[in-house]
Image (spheres, rainbow, N blue to C red):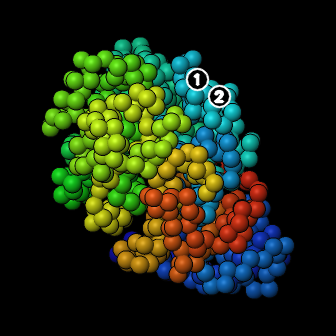
Amino acid sequence: MKFKVFLILIAASMSRSVAQPIKTAGNRFDILIRNGLIYDGSGQPPQPGNVGIRGNRVVAIGKLLNATAATVIDAQGKAVAPGFINVLSHTGLELLRDGHSMSDVKQGITTEVFGEISWGPINTDAMRQQVNLNLKPYNLMCNWTTLADFMVKLQQKGITPNIASYLGAGQVRESVLGEANVKPTPAQLEQMRAIVRKAMEEGALGVTTALIYPPNTFADTDELIALCREAGRYGGRYIAHIRSEGDRLEDGINELIKIGQEAKVPVELYHFKASGQRNWPKMESAIRLINKARQQGQDVTADMYTYTAGATGLTSCLPPYLFNGGFMAGWKRLQDPATRQKLIAEVRKSGNDWENMFQLAGSTDNILLTAFEVDSLKKYNGKTLGQIATIWHKDPIETVMDLIVADKSRVETTYFLMSEENVKKGISQPWVSFGSDAGSISEDRKDVGVVHPRTFGNFARLLGKYVRDEHVMSLEEAIRRLTSLPATNHKLTDRGLLRSGYFADIVIFDPATIADKATFSDPFQYAVGVQHVLVNGVLVLKDGKHTDVFPGQSIWGPGRKSRTH
């Protein structure tokens, strides 16, 4: 009974926290946000009020009678919320080129969490060579070694958002084993565990992987458990693109849960989905599996993007063993006629033990080619595999192989795989947060090809289409899932809530107009409806325009010996 009374008192306190007049020393602030409808990120209903900021922190919330400030922002009754958190960001290298992070800041994103891979450690010449290849279009070179080095480099360069990162299990494996499909010896596994320990002490949030891609896919469950145990000693999390999101979805989730249980770490599933029409009914059983684990006391969560299509390489139409030894090893094998015939038969075969995107798409019309490296192939950006196969008068699987060989790249590709009904089912789960699974770029970056619209619209689409228009959840619940839920999951200290003493990461937006504009055919369009964004108490977006200041900071994981911000 005492516990129930305690909960009631806490709830009452939370509901009053915004509305009470608060008098602080001098009632003088650096920034004062007036006339806001304050959503504090807890999931509680909003309250009208004002927000006082000094330095990089919120110091007062309420009526704030007689308050003054050097800068006053009139919210005009619009929503004032904690800055949104992108829990699966691939904008690391893009921030190295351009710190503005425009497509995300225009949606209210104040923190980017890097995952699936990591930009460190870079421990071998082959790894450095590959990163330099990615940096070549930016005229930059890789001059860092550890993940922490990379994070500090971004912060020192000047960036808009805060950044945090998981350590890539693939990068750990490659540091010791290269890109070969081999099992580590006990001594090699100890080397890998030592890399995890070092990264956790330098501030990684935990261990991440993407288990459909080589060399990550070559890691077995025991290897992942061993690495995650090291992360767990420092309070880290395991977060993964599971081994299958389609034909073996339940197996993939069960492996995730097993790793969490045996390594004693919380776990999260990236971009929750059931891929391929034949697998759409599995979404219900996937939800049941996660709910069962949670009911048994295990910390299991997921995140999503808000679209029915995913994006990866055209290489995902082919079995991972092809790339044993790295992409170039696979590229050479693709030029062998006998290997090609074997691959065609395997891609067509049902019951594969790998994630066969060619089959899951259901039709070559559902495979959209979006970015080529070779200039002569860029005319095919935005065309489907079926269209290109028709133009070339070739079998579609032959066309897949020929395109990869000709472009000497994985060929960026969008796959239409999911159902709208399942997107809504996933969004409805209270343990689901949101990640774009994309970079953050400006509208003029059309040189990168035809990007997935999630690059420009993932978060605004949630708040506009699914919250305002389709009422999948309340606005206060959606804001909780964009703020305090991911901040708690990923241990982003003093972020995710509008509370006195928390960092002043704040978004001011209009719930009536916020919307995504990007489409699959015309993705380079900013979302609308976000007026102002503050990062660490600094106004980075004012009346929808970037202010050309870069206050973003590295957010370090719980194992870092010095967690300065």
Q: Which residue is mark 2?
A: 142
Q: Can residue 203 be spotted in the picture? A: yes
Q: Looking at this view, is 192 or 313 the one in front?
A: 313
Q: As drawn, which residue projects farthest toward the left?
A: 350
Q: Which residue is mark 1?
A: 128
**Alpha carbon of mark 1 to alpha carbon of mark 2: how far?**
7 Å
Q: Earlier in the sequence, mark 1 or mark 2?
A: 1
Is 511 positioned to the left or the right of 285 in the image?
right
Q: Residue at x 26, y 53 (%)?
A: 274
Q: Which secondary structure lies at badge 1? A: helix
Q: Quadrant of the N terminus?
A: bottom left
- In percent of width and height, residue 22 lies at 70, 80
* The quadrant where residue 535 appears: bottom right
Q: Amino acid at mark 2?
A: Cys
Q: Looking at this view, is 300 or 342 the one in front?
A: 342
Q: Amino acid at mark 1?
A: Arg
User: Quick check: marks 1 and 2 in contact, CB under 8 Å?
Assistant: yes
Q: Residue at x 69, y 33 (%)?
A: 139
